Image (cartoon, grey):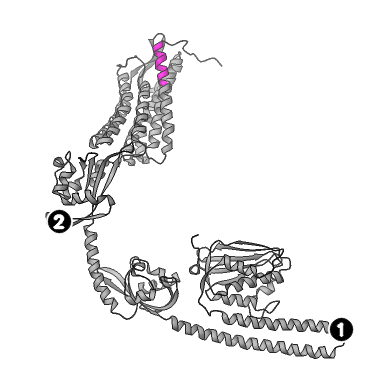
Amino acid sequence: MAPLPLSPSFPADILVLMVLMIISGIILLAIAFYALRYKQNPVTRPFVILLVLCAAWAFLESAIFFFSDPDSIISMDALEYSCFFFIPPALLVTIMVYLGMTWITRPKYVALLLAVPIISTSLLLSNDYHHLFFTEYGLREALNGLFFANVTIGPYFYVHFVFSNSLIGISFLLLGMHAWSNPGIFRKRDLLIIAGLAPPFVGEILTTFGSAPTPGVSWAPVLFMYMGVVLLYAIYRYQIFDIVPMARGLVWDSTPDPFFVTDIHGTVVDMNFAAASSFRLDPSAVIGHPVENLAASIPVIGHALTYGSSLNTVVLDESGGKKTYYEAGTLPIGNDKGKQAGMLVFFRDITSHKLLEQAMEQSEARYRKLLDSAPFPIVIVRRSDGSIMLLNDAMESLLKGERSEVISHPASQFFLDPSDITKMTDMLSTGTKLTDFESAMMNVKGETFWAYVSAMPVTLDDEPMLIVAVHDISDRKMAEELRTAQQKLNLLYGITRHDLLNKFMVFGGYLELLRRTEDRKARDEIIGKLEKNARDAQELMRFTHDYERIGISAPTWQSVQAVFQRAVGQLDLTGIEVKTDVGSVEILADALLEKVFYNLLENSIRHGETVTCISLRKEEDAGKGLRIIYEDNGSGITAEDKARLFHQGVGKNTGQGMFLSKEILQITMITIMEDGVPGKGVRFKLSVPSIYHRSPAA
């Protein structure tokens, strides 16, 4: 391959320009790389694109000096132009996004901005066929044997020129208008950005009209170095990537709450329209004067200055013949060095809230007097969000808590089963009268009770409400449960008495055989059967004792980990590894919960045959509650035994353990099932409803 025709040497002034252009490109790329740290800022992407295009322009302009043959110079010049075509749209998008006009990034607007640059690039690259961009395109010797493009402008060039410079002009006009409307540090920041961006574009215009210091060489890429230095200063001095101005003047004056800004000496430097309107002030007579002058003439401002540092001071303004309540405060304003540069004095009009609060207090007093005269528990519930607005003394006593622990809280938190709320809401929404709906409830202390709930929709102060009456039926419910328990016990006693009679009949039969048998081996076998029969009778009596204790005391919150470990401690588990992974979870269960785990462990030891590992863990049950999983690696349970595993009297021993476990768990609606694989071990799943489990903070 033939070597590229490079210029053999460079004059000193051209060499300096080349170096400056290369340095400019490097600086711009470095700033672009730094800007990528702020990807969350919407201005970052167009700003980086602008810098990359400018850097490419600088590198291509410097590269032209390396070539001396016409084709290479013309090709490099075309590439340089192609970069420049896209710089004005990138500049406009960057400035508009910086000013908060992010709509410019919508695809349809971006497409419109890119249409002319794309057409310009296409016409430039195909200029030899139509000469619309340049009518003549050649070379001329400009400096010490160096050649530069010599062109005659074609008709389309003017389209490109007007379009590009219009975008540049609009960009600086928008930024200038924004700077003019901003005070202090914001104006300085915008003016600094203008000072950094403008010179390269001015340099390019001068080059276009032949007024550049070096004929044939664009000074814009050289001035990019200046632009980069100024932008670096703006980034570090004013954190232009940390805060993007979002039409500050519009936001400031559109804010309905009054604001004043003072400098470090207490002089008012700015105020919004709401401040002038609310306190009937002329900004020209206030700005530039001490804020103490305002405090002397308008007491509410003096009150805010004196007590407003707490940020929630409520002040009353009675000037102008009407009462206006404000939440007033002051906030320090810091500069970029972290030192206080001034103070923001703000007021938030809370008149409507205050008047509503006073009206509600008056209404609440009337309603409370009416409610307290009722002898039964009543609450008033707001229908929009289900929160409790009022309650009477009887309800406060029933819930065993202070009013502050009930009012504004959702009524649903006092119902054990969330589905009850859904059912009652559905009934009320269809117009069905809600009377004596039976539900399990919970007081402030977490104690459960049963109640009849009745509700009637009403409108109070133009707001839909529910008057809810609650009738405690715990005593009646307990009596029903006692009757049910008595029936179950009577049934159990009948079954157990029958089983014991059978055992005694078998016992008597074996004794008769023992009297008649002389053979020692046969006698030993009969004695063994007698002993087993006696143990079975003993187990039946123990089961009866445990069963009649179910439900005697109210269910309590119990740590699964602690209860399981107590059960483990009662058995000899030598050679068996026990693993638990239930965390701090607690379940609401009968006091005999420990007996459930004891039965599971004992069955693993007695019937598992090859058990070497037992585990207890928990898992969420897809919004339905919690599962507690008990597993071992023993012989498992056959499919035949699984079907009747929890029936009374079924099993390899007395057949009462699993039945008893099921009954204990059912007290708090916990279900138990077994789905292990025969030959690989058992797996018992205890499904706990969501209202009956919790995980206290450690």
Residue depicted at 41% across the width and 26% down the height: 27
Residue 612 position within the rendered picture, expressed as x and y whole percent measured from the top left: 71, 63
Q: Between 106 and 282, which is closer to the camera in this rendering?
A: 282
Above or below residue 514? Residue 390 is: above
Q: Which residue is mark 2?
A: 318
Q: Amino acid at mark 1?
A: Arg
Q: What number is the disc on residue 351?
A: none
Q: Is residue 369 left or right of residue 228?
A: left
* Residue 572 in sight here: yes
> Which residue position is annotated with label 1?
520
Residue 376, above or below 147: below
Q: Residues within 10 Å of mark 2 (few under 14, many from 20)?
A: few
Q: Position of residue 688 (x, y in %)?
A: 53, 69
Q: Along the polypeptide, which appears first: circle 1 or circle 2?
A: 2
Query: The magenta stretch spans which residues?
Result: 1-21
CA–CA distance in space, label 1 to label 2: 113 Å
Residue at position x 18%, y 43% in the image:
291
The quarter holding residue 672 reads bottom right
The residue closer to the viewer here, 204 or 129, is: 204
Residue 61 location (% of width, % of height):
41, 20
Q: Is residue 18 magenta?
A: yes
Residue 305 is covered by the magenta coloring: no
